[in-house]
Image: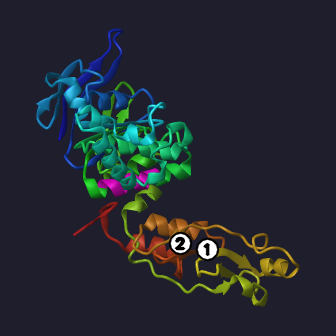
């Protein structure tokens, strides 16, 4: 457990980076520090491993005041992941991952063997072990950074905006990977980001910091969305918090409708009236694109299937949230979101009005919690 009690950090020029911070990070949870630039979130996190010392107050890790613990010993027991991975460019991937175990006295041979296991755990191909960081993509480098932080199996993991330097697709993949790892390992994680969507997706609890290093609210993501503590918190979360809140309510009450489907070779035989749509399937049965009457006509005149369809639309897997169901419906050109099973086979469609009806009929005191 990590505990801040009236912790303040003031620099010699009088700048207050963190102002009277009091909060507890429970053991085995992922807590996100979020806020605009210069709000003290990174300073707060770096005080945990004494990269920065507090000016006043008490910060404890497992009941021990960090200012009274040897800094090197403290840091060896805390994993640390930073933006752009921070890998040592002159070392191969395998040796980057093995760095901390070797520093702790483990033989290089054993450390490398264990490093390969950790690489596989974070989704890295073992074939990358002998490459250098410059030979990896940005996403691969970040996975190496996570693997290095986990190599010594520390109970605490600090992550300082680790995914901010990668593209959105890779970022989403890495977020999903962290959630998977946390479900398996149950580390105590403090994750810093300026992205509120990332914070809401990852955090068991989210601490919102404001200008001047002040903690504005510390709550579960659903509670943060439904009950922002102030106008500053509401403004930082954004005006679409109602839509975001749908991610905390499951879509079990949303019915599935029949979807007209056609295999790609059979598109020319379709008889669609204006306003009607059909879902074109790939040879393996997975959804490819929607087609309407005008699209069929273009296809008959020699246009490719891609040119003659309005592709797109998110897929919905039953068991997901109302947000995913609504997004599937709204992003579909036909107005019918495609529902698929685990093998990407079409099992029906979802409509936006059904999502709203399910939300209306679900008694809740706030998102994600039903009333008695």
Can see residue 230? Answer: no
Q: Is residue 115 left or right of residue 293?
A: left
At a point 28% along the width and 44% down the height, the residue shown is 110
The image quarter in which residue 9 lies: top left
At a point 48% along the width and 31% down the height, the residue shown is 89
The numbered mark, 2 or 1, whose residue comes first in the sequence reads 1
Magenta-colored segment: predominant secondary structure: helix
Q: Quadrant of the C terminus?
A: bottom left
Q: Is residue 258 left or right of residue 36?
A: right
What percent of the width, then of the height, locates residue 206?
32, 45
Tell me the residue that label 1 is attached to. 335
Q: Is residue 93 left or right of residue 102?
A: right
Which segment did they paint magenta? 174-182
Mark 2 and mark 1 residues within 8 Å of each other at the beta carbon? yes
At a point 39% along the width and 78% down the height, the residue shown is 253
What percent of the width, then of the height, locates residue 221?
34, 51
Which residue is more in the foreground, 4 or 167? 167
Which residue is more in the foreground, 306 or 96? 96
Tell me the residue that label 2 is attached to. 352
């Amino acid at each position: 457990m990590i505990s801040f009690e009236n912790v303040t950090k003031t620099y010699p020029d009088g700048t207050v980076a963190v102002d009277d911070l009091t909060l507890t990070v429970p053991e085995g949870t992922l807590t996100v520090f979020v806020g605009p630039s210069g709000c003290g979130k990174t300073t707060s996190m770096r005080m945990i491993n004494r990269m920065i010392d507090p000016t006043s107050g008490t910060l404890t890790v497992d009941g021990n005041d960090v200012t009274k613990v040897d800094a090197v010993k403290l840091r060896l027991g805390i994993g640390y992941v930073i933006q752009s991975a921070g890998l040592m460019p002159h070392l191969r991937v395998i040796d980057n991952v093995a760095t901390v175990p070797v520093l702790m006295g483990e033989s290089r041979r054993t450390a490398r063997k264990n490093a390969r296991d950790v690489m596989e755990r974070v989704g890295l191909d073992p074939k990358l072990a002998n490459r250098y960081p410059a030979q990896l993509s940005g996403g691969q480098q970040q996975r190496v950074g996570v693997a290095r932080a986990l190599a010594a199996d520390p109970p605490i993991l600090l992550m300082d905006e680790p995914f901010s330097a990668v593209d959105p697709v890779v970022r989403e993949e890495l977020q999903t990977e962290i959630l998977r790892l946390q479900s398996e390992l149950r580390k105590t994680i403090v994750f810093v980001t300026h992205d509120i969507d990332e914070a809401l997706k990852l955090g068991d609890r989210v601490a919102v910091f404001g200008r001047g290093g002040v903690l504005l609210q510390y709550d579960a993501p659903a509670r943060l969305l439904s009950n922002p503590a102030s106008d500053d918190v509401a403004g930082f979360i954004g005006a679409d918090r109602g839509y975001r809140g749908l991610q905390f309510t499951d879509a079990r009450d949303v019915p599935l409708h029949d979807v007209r489907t056609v295999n790609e070779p059979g598109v020319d035989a379709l008889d669609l009236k204006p306003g009607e749509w059909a879902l074109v399937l790939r040879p393996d049965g997975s959804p490819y694109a929607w087609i309407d009457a005008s699209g069929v006509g273009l296809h008959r005149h020699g246009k490719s299937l891609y040119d003659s369809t309005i592709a797109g639309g998110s897929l919905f897997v039953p068991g997901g949230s109302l947000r995913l169901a609504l997004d599937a419906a709204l992003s579909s050109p036909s107005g019918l979101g495609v529902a698929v099973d685990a093998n990407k086979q079409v099992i029906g469609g979802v409509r936006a009005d059904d999502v709203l009806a399910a939300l209306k009929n679900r008694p809740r005191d706030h998102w994600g919690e039903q009333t008695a």
